[in-house]
Every structure is written in structure tokens, then in C-alpha cells.
Amino acid sequence: MSIQDDVAKSIGAVKTDASAKELTTFKGGGTLKNVFLPKTTREFLRTISALYELNVQPFIIGGGSNLIVADGEIETPAVLTKNLNKARVENGFAFLECGVKISDFARLAREQNLGGLEFLAGVPLTLGGAIRMNASAFSRQIFDFVESVFVFSTRACYERVCEVKKRDVDYGYRKGADGVIVGAKLKLERVEKSQSLARVKEYLSIRAERQPRGNTCGSVFKNGEIPSGKLIEKCGLKGLRHGGAEISRKHANFIVNTGGATAADFLALVEICERRVYEEFGIKLEREFKVIR
């Protein structure tokens, strides 16, 4: 029996293995051999604690965007948050667990004539990932709505959750709260249901026009003064393929899995973009995605 088996047995969390096709929006890459699926927040915290005690740093996986699983069999443990999907709204404030899908929650809030998160329509994102990276689009960011974040830390609050006020979070572009995100408190806007639906329709239309369909991990690189997609496009790299991966012909800051793409295919295109942009413009692209190895 492995250490991970011992952990799973002691905390009651389900342990299995799962492929990148199941866990990521890119749907290409290897297999994670140690995947924990806690059923409750308490079980989630116990899982993280048990792994930390073994000096193991797990990956927390929500919606699976901005994530690439290296090819082959990966031993690094992953903890899935999909069962941590409780949300409630009280007096205009929302309390969400980390695994809540933003799209699902937006529909719930809309029924109470509350909104604000419409700018994330069409993004396969959970609350935890949105808080971790300060998800943003159309000149809005999720921290415009955050009141506080509930974070787990073995040093600050062993097997407990600390509430960190927004003013104490050093957030910015593609940078949100540190630590293990357990949940958050949001302050929503008063928006009529019809107005919210109109916003969603508009944002979805813009995304459909600008971004490729198909399996991607989302934006590959962070944007600087000049958008990364423009730099890549100016290097003539749109449509470049490596194996089953292709730099999108619609938006060069997306890499599409056209069928059977591996993590190596994806990373080969990433490295080509980085090299060519630096050679042409002297600009170092900054990766937005994470790789589980």
C-alpha cells in the first residue's frame, strides 16, 4: 500500500487515477495516479493537512483550465474540488465554496436579481481558480466583488480556515490570493435578471467572435503592454502545428488540441512562441498556465 493509499484510507477521501482528458480543458496529456476527491470541506482540509504532513505539495484542481498534465504517469497528488459546490446568498452577499462553478452561481444569483460576474460568462472556471488568479476580462476582475477570502494554512490555522479581508490580499493582474482557497465572500451588484441575461449574451458573443472553439487551456501567456497574441501573430505563428496541437488561427494566444495532442505537443509550441517573440521583439512572454509533473 502506498503512502497516498494510507492517506486516503485515514481521511475517507476517494483516491483514484484520472487522465488529463478528464481533468483539464485542453484534454491532452498524461495520467495522474493519485487523485483525491473529498466530499466535504472538512474532508478537503484533512486531505491537504495529511499531504502536507508528508511534505507533499498537492495540486488543487477545479475547472481544469490553465492547467497541463505532463505526459506519462504522474505521481504528484491532486485534490479535486468539484464536490465543494455549496453557495448561498444573504442580503446581497454571496458565500461560495471553492468548487462552485462561476457559471452555475451566476444563474443562481440572477434569480435574485443579483449579478456582476457576467464578464466571466463562457469561462470554465470555479471560485477557487478565479480567486487564485484574480480572473479578469472586459476591464473587470473578480476582486472587484470580493469582500474576503477563506484560506487554509497549516502554519496560520492548522485544520482551520482563516478569513482574509480583501484589503490584506496583494492582488493584481492575474494575481489573487495565496494559499489553499477554501471559499470566499462576495458583494454582488443589484442587476435585473433581464439585464444580466443581456450582458451574458453580449459577452458570449464577443468571446465566440474572438476566441477559438475546441479544447484549449485558455490564454497561454499573460498580456503585457502589447497583447501576447498580437506578438505571436506578428511572428507569423498562427496556424503552426506540432502533433495534435495548433496555435489558433483565430487568436494566437490560444493553443488548440485538434485531436490527440500531448502535453509535449503543447509545450513545443509554447517554447517556439517564447523564442520567436524574444528574437523578434526582445520581449519575454510570461506563461499563464501551470504544469503538473
Image (cartoon, rainbow, N blue to C red):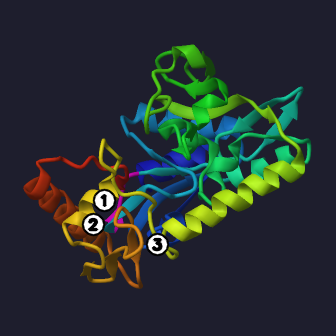
Please name the residue that numbered disc 3 is placed on: 27
Left or right placement of residue 190 versus residue 14 in this view:
right
Q: Nearer the viewer, mark 3 or mark 1?
A: 1
Residues in magenta, as a range: 72-76
Up-down: is 249 above or below 20?
below
Left or right placement of residue 183 versus residue 226 in this view:
right
Disc 2 on helix, strand or loop?
A: helix
Identify residue type, mark 1: Lys
Q: Earlier in the sequence, mark 2 or mark 3?
A: 3
Q: Which mark is residue 257?
A: none
Query: Can residue 86 be found in the magenta stretch?
Result: no
| Figure quadrant of residue 69 | bottom left
Identify residue type, mark 2: Glu
Query: Residue 203, how many percent across, how many down?
Result: 65, 57
Left or right placement of residue 263 versus residue 198 in this view:
left
Query: Residue 127, how many percent across, how many down?
Result: 63, 43
Q: Quadrant of the C terminus?
A: bottom left
User: Can residue 254 be seen in this snapshot?
Assistant: yes
Marks 2 and 3, how far apart at CA: 24 Å
Query: Residue 4, how many percent across, how many down?
Result: 46, 50
Identify residue type, mark 3: Lys
Marks 3 and 1, how far apart at CA: 25 Å
Please name the residue that numbered disc 2 is placed on: 233
User: Can residue 101 be seen in this snapshot?
Assistant: no
Q: Residue at x 38, y 40 (%)?
A: 56
